Amino acid sequence: MALAAAILASCHEPETASAGADPVISAAVAGVDIDSVRTYIDELVTFHTRHTLSSQTDPQKGIGAAVDYLAGRCERWARNAAPDRPQPLVERISYTVGENGGRYDRVTEVPELMVTLPGTRAEREILLMAHIDTRVLDVMDSTKFAPGADDDSSGLACLLEAVRILSQIPLEQTVKCLFVSGEEQGLDGSRHFAALARRENWPVMAVLNNDMIGNVRASGTELVEDHKLRVFSESRNGEDSDSRQLARYIKEMAAIYVPEQEIVLNYRTDRYRRGGDHSSFLREGYTAVRVCEYCEDYERTHQDVRTENGTAYGDVADYVDFPYLVRNIRVNLAAVMNLAMAPDRPGNVLLANAGELDNHTVITWEPVSGQDVSYQVLCRETDRSEWMPSLPTGASGIVPSGAPLEFSCPLSKDNYYFAVRAVSPGGHPGLPVLAR
Ligand SMILES: [Zn+2]
């Protein structure tokens, strides 16, 4: 009987591993360079302001010069890309703002940037995102000094390191780095990108929006957390939304590749009264999270640079914690690279015996494309947030390549949630799908 065979299979530890570190990814993660990161941020703040409505023609100041700088760096890395990987592509993109009023005093075209690092298979895309634009207290002020060292040069530094490092490494799936503008004016740049993705049918697997990942101090309470990073995932589709699976995945990969950084899963779309560019992709139905520092400093973000009653205000580079930022960039790389080497999500994951009074659980699913893909069944108790590393029976839950796509275990479906994910021959797990 198939069921008995499956139970038997589940009791033996198969050879396929899924939780070990990939040496290529470990080396890439270690390659994130603090001096490079410091240089990017020092250079980004020299543009005085990167406000969405700031100058596009001044060679030294404003968003136009900043986009030239970002594009210049990426074009250089693209030209020197490793010969064994598909050629990276740097594209300047613009979109129209101000047609519907909002935080704009005129109708104009504003720039942004997309860097595509094509995969060798290129069936799916992982998007890394950060915003170029900055602001001061008055969101309409496009000329005042608005360095935006943390908000969001820290995120831009993450994208720049990703382009620099991944231009040297062939990955199976495509990674796109989206440098967006218009965030502070109302998420306009990311909305433009999300609509473009929908219109052009980008095969997006995951979106990681990095917005403020370099500050460690909480103003007012003086709490300092330099080993915690938040990942926000939406709650509106329940606790097992695809975005939440992505958030848990980032935490799992960080535990393997950047164990000194604790990922705090925040089961909210974003912070109170504030949003981010991932929301634009959520609205289009994509799997998207926000990666963000644990503590926020309101004496920095959106402030005019000044000293008042002995307190210094403003988002200047002095307050960025570079070792912390480097660890957060490493977390991004670990997650993105694993996703780019992982198989797709399995389809139609079902609790096959949900209608039966039975203390076993039987799960079935549809295969994903790719040779030698194995599968891993995950579970957790209903009040737990994260998938267990192995099943409570002691089994790994791995269904080897070529075995029937069915798994049975002596655990009650009433006491656990179950999910299935596909695992590459190299041991890179994909995103899990909850069994319905
Ligand atoms: Zn921001």
Image (tube, rainbow, N blue to C red):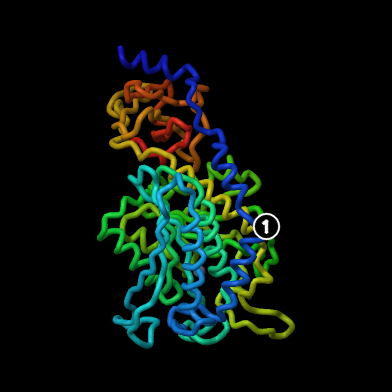
Q: Which residue is mark 1?
A: 323
Residue 314 in view, yes or no = yes
Q: Check the picture and name the quadrant holding the C terminus.
A: top left
Q: Relative to 19, does residue 81 appear above or below in the rendering?
A: below
The amino acid type found where label 1 is placed reads Pro
The location of residue 361, given as percent across then percent down, is 37, 25
Q: Nearer the viewer, residue 112 or 199?
A: 112
Q: Secondary structure at mark 1?
A: helix
Residue at 42% x, 55% y: name it: 88
The location of residue 237, given as percent across then percent down, is 35, 51
Position of residue 195 in the picture relative to residue 270 (left or right): left
Residue at 48% x, 25% y: name it: 16
Residue at the extreme left of the image, as rendered = 199
Residue 1 quadrant: top left
Q: Nearer the viewer, residue 303 or 352?
A: 303
Residue at 43% x, 72% y: name it: 181
The location of residue 295, given as percent across then percent down, is 61, 62
> Is disc 1 surrounded by few (<14), some (14 to 19) or many (20+) residues within 10 Å?
some
Q: Relative to 174, does residue 419 appear above or below in the rendering?
A: above
Residue at the extreme top of the image, as rendered = 1
Residue at 55% x, 55% y: name it: 230
Q: Nearer the viewer, residue 227 or 155?
A: 155
Q: Relative to 191, does residue 198 appear above or below in the rendering?
A: above
| Mark 1 close to ligand 1, CB under 8 Å | no
